[in-house]
Amino acid sequence: MEIVATIGPLSTNYSTIKSIIEAGANLLRFNFALGSTEEMIERVDVAKKVISDHNYNNVKILADLPGCKIRVCDFIEGKLHINKKNKYIFKSCFELTSCKEFIPINYPNIGKCVSLDQLLIIGDGEIVFCIEEIYNDESFTAVALNSGVLRALNGISISGEIDKLNHFTSNTINHIKSLDYLRPDFVAFSFVRDADMVIKGKELIQHSCGINYKPKIVSKIETPLGIENFESIVGITDIILLARGDLAVYTDYSKLGIYQTKAIDICKLHKKKIIISTQVLESLVDRYFPTRSEVSDLTNIVLKGAHGIMLCKETVLPSEPSHTIEVAKKIISQALLAQGNERFYI
Ligand SMILES: Nc1ncnc2c1ncn2[C@@H]1O[C@H](COP(=O)(O)OP(=O)(O)OP(=O)(O)O)[C@@H](O)[C@H]1O
Ligand SMILES: CC(=O)C(=O)O
C-alpha cells in the first residue's frame, strides 16, 4: 500500500523529510500549485538529497502540477476570521495586499465569473459564502453562511466553471519545463476531464524534457467531466488519483462515497492503480488520535482494494508529520491483517 505524503513549506527540511520516510511514506508529493518553480526545485532537491544519502531506493517523488484554480491570494495577515451573516468584498488582485478592505482573488475579472445567489466554497468546504451583489467586473460582495477562518491560498470553487477552463496555463507550462531538471518519478495532472487532456499533458512533457523521460502519469479526478469520462481516462493513464478535496466541492458531496466505490471497482477491472486523497486523517492536524470515521474510512479504502492513500494537510500543517504516517501505517496494517481472516475478534 502506497502512503503518499505531501511535503509543504514546514516539512521541507532534511530531518523532517527523513522522519516522514522512516515512518513509512514511500511517495513524496510536492504540490506545485502552492509555490514558484524555484521554490519547488529547492524543496524537491532537499528530498532527493535525503533519498540518495540514505539509499531510500523505494521512495519516489511526485510532482503534482497545478491546473487553473481560483484562489484567495497570499495576503499580509495570512488568515482572516469570518463571521456568519457578515458581508465581505471579494476583488481580483495581483499584488500582496492586506485583507482589511477586501478579500483578494487571484483571477482577473472575477465579477464576470459569478452570478447572484451563487455559492462560493472556500477550501474543502470550511466556509461557504452566498453572492449578494456584483459591483463591477472586478469585484462583488458575499454573505458568509458560517463562521470560520479563511486562509491565504485557500481554493475558491465556483460551480459550473471548472471543466470549461484551460488547465495548461502558463504557470503549468513553466512548471513542466522545470521537470527537465527535476525528473520526478511521477507527474500528476490536475482537473483531468478526458483522455485528450492526458495525451496533451504527455506531449507537453515530451516537448520540454525529450522522449527519454517517461514519468508515470497520474490523472487527478476532481470534476464532473472527470467522473463522466472516467473509463477512458483510466485507459490512458498509469495511476488514478481520486482527489476528494476538489471532487466534493465541484460535484455533489453526498455522492462522494459512491464515486469512490465505483472508481476503485473500475480501476481493479482495468488493472490500474488508484490512490485516494484528502481528509484521510485530517483531524491529526490538531489531534493525537484520529476520528472514528477516519479509522473506518481508511480501513474500507484498504479492504476495497485501493492501491494507496495521499495525505495532504495532515502532513503539511502539523509540527510532527511523521506521527500522521505512523497512524496511517497502523490502521493499514490492521486492515491488511484482517483480510482473509474470518475471525471477528483479532
Ligand atoms: N507553499 C505553501 N504556502 C502556504 N501554505 C501552504 C503551502 N503549501 C501548502 N500549504 C498549506 O497546506 C495546505 C495543504 O496543502 P496541500 O498541498 O495538500 O493542499 P491541497 O488542498 O491538496 O491543494 P489544492 O488546493 O491544490 O487542491 C494548503 O491548503 C495550505 O493551507
Ligand atoms: C489533492 C487534491 O488536489 C484534492 O483532493 O483536491
Image: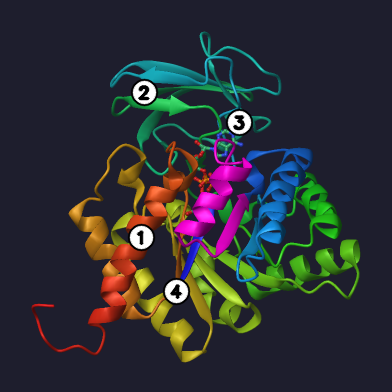
Q: Looking at the image, is mark 3 or mark 1 nearer the viewer?
A: 1
- Residue highlighted by disc 3: 110
Q: Residues within 10 Å of mark 2 (few under 14, many from 20)?
A: many
- In reply to whether residue 15 is colored magenta, the answer given is yes
Q: Residues within 10 Å of mark 3 (few under 14, many from 20)?
A: many
Mark 1 falls on what kind of element? helix
Give above or below for 232 relative to 330: below
Q: Is residue 211 visible?
A: yes
Upstream in sequence: badge 3 or badge 4: 4
What is the distance, in whole Å, between disc 4 and disc 2 at their CAs?
A: 43 Å
Q: Position of residue 189 (x, y in %)?
A: 65, 61
Q: Which mark is residue 143?
A: 2
Q: Is residue 223 visible?
A: no
Tell me which amino acid carries mark 1: Ala
Using the image as rendered, state which of residue 154 and residue 102 is in the foreground.
Answer: 154
What residue appears at the point 21 percent right and 57 percent down from the top-left corner?
Answer: 293
Upstream in sequence: badge 2 or badge 1: 2
Q: Is residue 12 left or right of residue 246?
A: right
Mark 3 falls on what kind of element? helix
Indicate the quadrant where residue 51 lies: bottom right
What is the distance, in whole Å, between disc 3 and disc 1 at their CAs?
A: 40 Å
Q: Quadrant of the N terminus?
A: bottom left
What residue appears at the point 59 percent right and 36 percent down from the top-left corner?
Answer: 9
Q: Which mark is residue 328?
A: 1
Any atom of ligand 2 within 8 Å of the CB at mark 4?
A: no
What is the distance, in whole Å, between disc 3 and disc 4 at their CAs?
A: 42 Å
- Residue highlighted by disc 4: 1
CB atoms of marks 4 and 2 within 8 Å: no
Q: Residue furthest top?
A: 100
Give above or below for 31 relative to 10: below
